[in-house]
Image: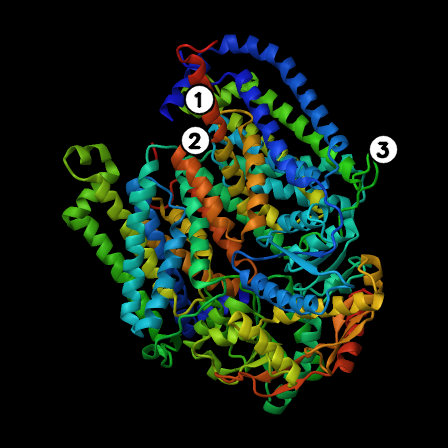
Amino acid sequence: MDIDALAGCLASPACLVTQTTSGLIIGMLLFLVAVGLTLIFGVLKVVNFSHGAFYMFGAYFAMTAYQLTDSFALAMLCGAAGTALLGLIFERVFMSRVYGADVLMQLLVCYAFVLIFDDVVRMIWGPEFKSMGMPSAFQVPPLFIAGGVVPPYYLLLIGVALAAALVLGLGLARTRIGKVIRAAAHNPGMVSALGINTGLLYGGVFALGGMLAGLGGALAAPVRSLTPGMGFSVLIESFIVTVIGGMGSILGALIGALLIGLIRSFGSLGFPLFTEGLMYLFMVIVLVSRPTGLFGKEVA
Amino acid sequence: MTELQADRASETLTTPRIETRSFRSRYRDILIALVAFAVLAALPFFFGSKALLDFVIRCSAFGLFATSLNLLVGYTGMISFGHGMFFGLGAYGFGLLMQRTGVPIPVAFVATLAITAVFAAIIGAICVRLKEIYFAFVTLAFQMLIHSTILTWASLTGGDQGLRGGIPRPVFFGIDLANHVHLYITSCALLVLGLLLMRQIAQSPFGYTLRMIRDNARRASFIGIDVWRAKLTIFVLAALFASTGGMVMALFVSGAYPEFAYWTISGEGIFINMLGGVTTFLGPMVGTVLLLILNDTVTRYTEYHGIVLGVVILFFAIGLRKGLMDYVLEWYAQRRDGPGERG
Amino acid sequence: MKRTRQPGVSRRATLALMGAGAVTIAAPWVARAQAKTIKIGMPTILSGRVAQLGTSSRNAVLLEVEKVNAAGGLAGRQIEMVIRDSKGQPQEAARVARELVNTDGCEMLFDGEASSGSFAVHEVARDLGVLCIHTCSEASSLTADPKQHIPNAFRCVRQGIHDSIVGGSYAAAIAKAKGLKKWATCSPDYAYGRDTTGEFALYLKRFAPDVEIISESWPKLFQPDYTEVVTKILQAKPQALYTCLWGGDLTSYIDQANIYALFTQMEVFAVNMADYTALTVVKNLPKGIHSGNRYIKTFPKTPENAAWGDAYRAKYNEYPTNWSWQNATAVMLLTEAVKKANSTDGKKVAEALRGLTIKCPFGADGTVTMRAEDNTLVGYAIGWGTTIPQEPYVPEVKAGDWKTIFELEAEWKKSKGYT
């Protein structure tokens, strides 16, 4: 434990800015993965255990696109669009077959795809780790805000994630499709009775969730190494985020992700050896005091 | 699922008949257990293969673990994602006691069970109140907490390198666990005994209380059952058997490693249950044998075992939509009830 | 009425099923007679995050075995490698190792496991008494700790303690020359990371007493994001940073530290940088990172080493890794030991291996030795240099001095209570 370091940092504005932005970065990337998870759970009541794979594919798609076209924007687009398509296929061909079945059967299908996707990546891109490399536009010295260090790339990353959160939130609240999605989450039988194609809707939600995770992976690709199985550690953390925030709540996912990010960044100062444990402890505390998470609705 | 639930519900209604049936069937269970043990114990005399013995030892470890998980998942409807922590706890508790204190093996065995019971009671008291998916995630969180403690507390646990230097095995009651055949027989005995005890729990009135809680916890509490206490009790009992499985594994590898307390062990347990089926008592045991055979043969031929395993799982989940034993049972029942068949 | 829960039925069906299963699986388990070929079993990690460890080890072993077989094999017996995946799980490593010996009839084991898996295989070697050469595990205690010692197990791997001694003295010289007094460390939180970092700091301070460690970070192994660690180090404002992150973790760290311009603010000592896996993957490799040699074909600067690196690359279309040279050396050592013992009997070969010195492209002076006192490899090429972003990546490597290593290692062993 190193409480002095933590207190020292809290007293210094430069350190506060740096650590807070680093918490935001970790949090926002987590949010992109976690929000898809929570969206899919909210509408389809499926715990998508294979969600980490979409993050992984997003990163690999982006890397390949970047190597082929040398365009960062295209790489991001490929990462997001590729995983959206993958999500749609995955839902239509496989997940849709187990909606009526046991929760465990659904988990099992997801687990099967965790194994299959990892091996597919290993077959296509090889077992060794890869790196996409930072686009030259972002190879610039970091900015200094109130004495704190902030890399421009991370500003972009936070911006994109925030925009995604905003579009998603507004889209669900204001648009017709958003209403249908919320209605389907509430009462799927009624929605289909009204003549809405729930199959398409479910596929769409899965594609959207996959796309967000893929975007997260694509954004992470320039700074994180790519390996088969890379989705996994992200998946576990996103589970923690969604559980803390409340399964099915988008706002919850955002708050949960930011909290986890901040716990990581400040925890690494104060409790360098127990940062990971701190997250689990926090989750236990939240769940024991609020069994459905911070923003979750009561389960009947 | 709904069909099964209906079946389960009808069972709970016929409680008086079950009482008498379970009384008779208890002796039959014991008889079957004795025969099973005799067959297993005789194996080394017919097959010289050490690998076969290794296989059965691993089946014992995972079988105890998976069947105990089924007490929670199948019988009580508590989907635990953290059951592996007790497997790890058993392995570490036993290994540490043997390495550090030098007590006789039976003492270490009992002491490990006691330690596990304490841990399970504390963790269970916090967890069992939670519902469904939240119960699953909090148990998972505890599992990760224990895993991270094992990694961090390197002076006691050896950190990521595990308990090294082998587990000493002093001879007790003429049993020498350093001897492969002795270890094999002991594992079989633990397995058979463990299964028999779990069967007794499942068929006892308490076992039927658990089924009732699974099907309708509210109704159970209306008729005066303390749901929290029943859930906690089975949580602790299941932990004890998982811990026994962990001890068998520790003896097999002569050490304990953090991977034993990692969530993947829990995941494998769930997977085994799904594979074998959760509606029969022996389903998880069948699942264990199936998974280990699958694992051992597939890893022999390809390093892309993930794909192979994944496809097999898909076959079960999407094709059969149930565990193997559930499927066999249904098929059997259909054939028996079908016209023109004997029976 | 449909009754699906008849216990009698379920048990009978189950028993029948289990019986059928037992017959099918028992079939391949009939022990086979000793063949003319000699089988060597190798449990290693071929899937998951560190699959590269297994694949590059396998490549090197097969490359060397091909040569040995072409030259007539081991005492006239052709080698057949049986290489299986353990998925990096210790219980699988133990299971696979036992199966290789008991079922597949392997007479020797190469243990291509890392960390906990290697200790699990070590226990199997203890139990079965089979000759075992560890080829990937760098954990010092595996051979240094006399409690672990068994006469039939050897380690043909570089060791953290050797790296730390050489690194410590190299870094101390630079610290003195450039006046680097405030140091930070950032290493993965597991035994290898902790031990190696602790030892590095120990020897750094020994050679440059006024050095002070002002910040320590311990990210988890395989942690995807190091941002919080990077910023923490920036806060501490050290003059130099030591890290023993490796592989994908190291490249992630470099990519993430790069955009904070960390490398312009301090000297960085990354012991595991100079391995082609990391060097070729990092797109924007900063100039002037100090690194130990993992494997590079230009150190030692001999035609033999360069030829070996090129041959490997020609065959597999990628550069060898640190694991590759270690596994290749294991085959070379084994071949010489069998020659010396004139037998493939495990006990006799083990006897011959003990203290054996062979010519080897990876030796500091063209030879490596299997040290008799603790069955571990010494005399391999070890040194430090600074990186450039293109080939040959580390143009000048300053070789470590094995005499100093031996002295300090003996002292270290004493301090640990190993001797």
Q: Please give the label number shown on residue B322.
A: 2
Q: Amino acid at mark 2?
A: Lys
Q: Residues within 10 Å of mark 1 (few under 14, many from 20)?
A: some
Q: Quadrant of residue A146?
A: bottom left
Contact (Cβ within 8 Å) of mark 2 with mark 1 = yes
Q: Earlier in the sequence, mark 2 or mark 1?
A: 2
Q: Is residue B44 left or right of residue A143?
A: right
Q: Picture coordinates of residue C158 (x, y %)?
A: 68, 71
Q: Is residue A138 left or right of residue C266?
A: left
Name which residue lies at 61% across and 46% down: B260
Q: Quadrant of the N terminus of chain A?
A: bottom right
Q: Chain of mark 3?
A: B
Name which residue lies at 59% across and 85% down: C180
Q: Residues within 10 Å of mark 3 (few under 14, many from 20)?
A: few
CA gap, disc 2 and disc 3: 45 Å
Q: Nearer the viewer, residue C24 or A10?
A: C24
Q: Nearer the viewer, mark 2 or mark 3?
A: 2
Q: Amino acid at mark 3?
A: Gly
Q: Quadrant of residue C269?
A: bottom right
Q: Chain of mark 2?
A: B
Q: Please give the label number shown on residue B330.
A: 1
Q: Picture coordinates of residue C380 (x, y %)?
A: 71, 76
CA gap, disc 2 and disc 1: 10 Å
Residue on which disc 3 sits = B174
Q: Is residue B88 left or right of residue C125?
A: left
Name which residue lies at 68% across and 47% down: C99
Element marked by disc 3? loop
Contact (Cβ within 8 Å) of mark 3 with mark 1 = no
Residue C329, visible in the rendered structure: yes
Q: Taking C259 as reference, is B231 above or below it? A: above
Q: Nearer the viewer, residue B77 or C369?
A: C369
Name which residue lies at 58% across and 76% down: C311
